[in-house]
Image (spheres, coloured by chain):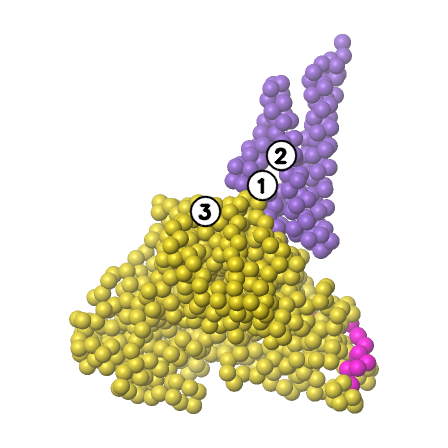
Amino acid sequence: MGALADQFGQMNMGQKGLRLFTTNLLTSPPEPMELRQPPPEIVLPPNSCLSQSPFANADSSYQRSTLNAIPTTNSLLNKSKIPLGLVITPYRSLKEGEDEVPVVTDTVIARCRRCRTYINPYVQFIDGGNRWRCCMCSLSNEVPQLFDWDQVRNQPGDRWARAELNHAVVEFVAPTEYMVRPPQPAVYIFLVDVSHNAIQSGMVATATRTILENLDRIPDDNGRTKVSIIAFDTSLYFFTLPSGGADSSMLVVSDIDDVFLPKPTDLLVNLQEARPALESLLGRLSDMFQDNHTIGSALGPALQAAFQLMASIGGKIIALTATLPSVGVGALKNREDPKALGTSKESGLLQAASPFYKTFAIECSRAQVSVDMFLFSSGYQDVATLAYLPHYTAGQTYFYPAFNASRTEDAIKFAHEFGKVLAMPIMLEAVMRVRASKNLRMSSFHGNFFVRSTDLLAMPAVPQDLSYAIEVQIEDTITSPFVVFQTAVLHTTCYGERRIRVITTALPTTSNLSDVFASADQVAIATLLANKAVERSITHKLEDARDALFNKMVEILSAYKASMTAAGAGASAQLAISENLKMLAVLVLGLLKNVGIRQSAQIPPDLRAYAQALLTSLPSQLLIPYVYPNFYSLHTMPPECGTVGEHGVIMPPPLPLTSERLERHGLYLIEDGQTLFLWIGRDAVPQLVMDVFNLPNYEVLRGGKTTLPVLDNPFSQRVNAIIQKTREIRRGVYHQHLYIVKEDGEPPLRLWALSCLIQDRADVLPSYQQFISQLKDKVNGSGY
Amino acid sequence: MAYVGWLYLFSVLMAAALLFAAVFFMIMFSDLESDYINPVDLCNKLNQFVIPEHAAHGFLTVLFLLSGQWIAFLLNAPLLAFNVRKIMKQNHVYDATEIFRTLEPHKKEIFIKLGFYLLSFFFYLYSMIVALVSDTP
Ligand SMILES: [Zn+2]
């Protein structure tokens, strides 16, 4: 990283040892490997941390700041033009081999009396260790009596071994003061669309089979989990699941204007007790409606029914639907209007068409009910409106456009993702709050939750691996040498324990602009900008969102040029930025070209809305490839790639995203975390086609969605290993479809794959070179 | 006292009521900011008053038009147009899911309305006195 920079740039020394390297964007092209670098180092002043533990500061996968050195004043921050914010993934999943989050089980929870901060590695012990000074507000607090007592062995304990003083990410078991009511069991209610479309697409059969296969994986450690199944078309179908018995009976409610529960008991049942009845129902459900010719959906009434069933407990509604809601409350119209696409009216299609999905979301949030939407329609389904419900109830939207289970790949993808959602441990009845040192204020919030008061985020259920972005304001001059951000999520685990997960990040402060630039985290900035852009596209126009992105990039470059280079306000032949922000411009270009933001009159509103839902919920690890995909050359990869090395399968080196790298005889892999494309050039030699696809030559190869065979030759095995690794390497539930793309194949698929190569020019969208020169003209013309 | 005097007397009372409503909105917003009220209750409460407030102002404006009080009418027409436009675009109600993001514009709007009603109050008072004086033989 350094060698490249020295070649082009000048060098400055930061105040506390962070070095600022300047690079010239005009002469140094994007280097994909740099996106895999960790964020700039957090250089805290000596003795700010009580612990020597390497885990005393939160890992960037849990919580990262756009700046790893916080400016002491708002004017210094404004000078840099870099937005200050946090990107938080409080409940991220653990990959094999990762340590569990340590748990403090003795319910001794030391908190600041004034600002309610939880004790952490950045407080100070004073008065002979009898008191501690809060790292946020400096108040001196008493150390709780039992803090130094080992309750397990009933003997004096070692304070310095306590998890909360050594780990930045810890969980406290909460005593009863933290409960409004006893911890509730996990509740899952499945709303299954059984209308004609849903049955014919095979969605119902696949969904019920997946639930059946995953019954053992649904979190139920203490046997309290409750489930219910409600089917719906334009009527509602309830099923009684008597405990112990194997027969269920169906109760039909056709009055959808005033939803009522047909029976007070046996509808919401204990998973273990009703297991036989549930299994038999799941086995039959699809067949029961096999000849259903009803078209239309009463999704709104079905949601209300589920709500009535669970309102006293809370939990999760999982709605699976392949139809635009057509009757009852929450009915929607097909508002897809091809003439509006690409115009200023387009953002209207991304707003909620019916207030029901917002007001109902608030009701859900109050009753601790979260909703996940699984959408399957082949026609317009108004994903934008439906996605509001998961958005405000802390759920997630999953979209399988034109789902057809007779294509094995469709069935596998959905079953894999749905299975993961079912098996996922969730946090129930959660609220999240972020506290920060004096003079720092959380000013706006992005992500799936309901903002319940100025800084309290209500999340009825927190799924794993969702990300939240919070903008931070500097209200007054910060005088301390470092600041602390602390995220606390009070929740009930899905096995009935009240807990608080606390994530603490300490960052140094600086009064030096070069430190601000040198500590900027381009990945966090891009994640925050993605959230802001989506918000703007909905409240204003898509065009405004794109302008804001472009202007933000111009501002940052102008600020850098004015204050960090010799050119100052004058024109410059260079486009300078610090080495650690070198990829920001191409990430912004990637955002401008993302389906959720892109200028185009061709993107169906449903796809756009879904892309926006992803942009505002994916953690950085998944968001970055979604914005700047990975591109590998497989036919020329070094021999060790695809074989198992020290850290698992060795991946090929990523290439810059430009079609200049595509050779006519080559085989390439392009992937954005959601889709995998295997691109094959038209002059591919028959041996290559034989080795990978088991077909005699390029001509007989068919493009499209596929499953790659594993053949008895090393190359096929290496390619499969790379695809496998790509599918597994990231957190989250997504299982990527694999498409074979022939260089001279069907144009839509080709264009889709090529749209991932964002450094190319596409239609009206500029190439990276054009984009950089637009930026340069703006920076030189704006005269900062 | 001629009908113009009565009209302005009525207007003075209406302006006072509207002024009172605007102050109430301001107080509620600052309660929200200090966490004394949650966004759902706030929106439910305020939304009850939005249509009556708009209707009262609209009624007053129409009265001025019908009675040929051109200056008073022109003074109120822009606000009426603004309100009508908001209702047409369906964004006159406060949305609890968005309230924290839109709080600043809402506060600004209420602040401007407050100033406007205050000015109107004195203008109507003045007009009423003028009408009364010219009425006296
Ligand atoms: Zn404190």
Does the residue tagged 1 have its C-beta within 8 Å of any atom of ligand 1? no
Which circle marks residue A326 in the picture? 3
Specify the amino acid type for callout 3. Ser
* Image chain in yellow: A
Dot 1 and dot 3 residues touching (CB under 8 Å): no
Q: What span is in magenta? A: A136-149
Using the image as rendered, state which of residue A294 and residue B32 is in the foreground. A294
Residue under the image location 59 percent in, 52 percent down? A261
Specify the amino acid type for callout 2. His
Specify the amino acid type for callout 1. His
Tell me if residue A304 comes above or below residue A460 in the rendering.
above
Left or right side of A491 for A657 = left
Q: What crowding class fits label 2: few (fewer than 14 Cα within 10 Å), some (14-19), or many (20 or more)?
A: some
Residue A198 lies in what quarter of the image?
Answer: bottom left
Residue under the image location 36 percent in, 66 percent down? A410
- Decide if residue A255 is in sight here: yes
Residue A184 painted magenta: no
Same chain shared by disc 1 and disc 3: no
Colour displayed for chain B in the image of the structure: purple
Dot 1 and dot 2 residues touching (CB under 8 Å): yes
How far from the left and from the top, in percent, is residue A434? 65, 67
Does the residue tagged 2 have its C-beta within 8 Å of any atom of ligand 1? no
Chain letter of disc 2?
Answer: B
In the structure shown, which secondary structural element does the residue marked by tag 1 occupy?
Answer: loop
Residue under the image location 57 percent in, 56 percent down? A306
In this figure, which residue is indicated by the disc labeled 1?
B92
How far from the left and from the top, in percent, is residue A146? 79, 82
Residue under the image location 72 percent in, 33 percent down? B17
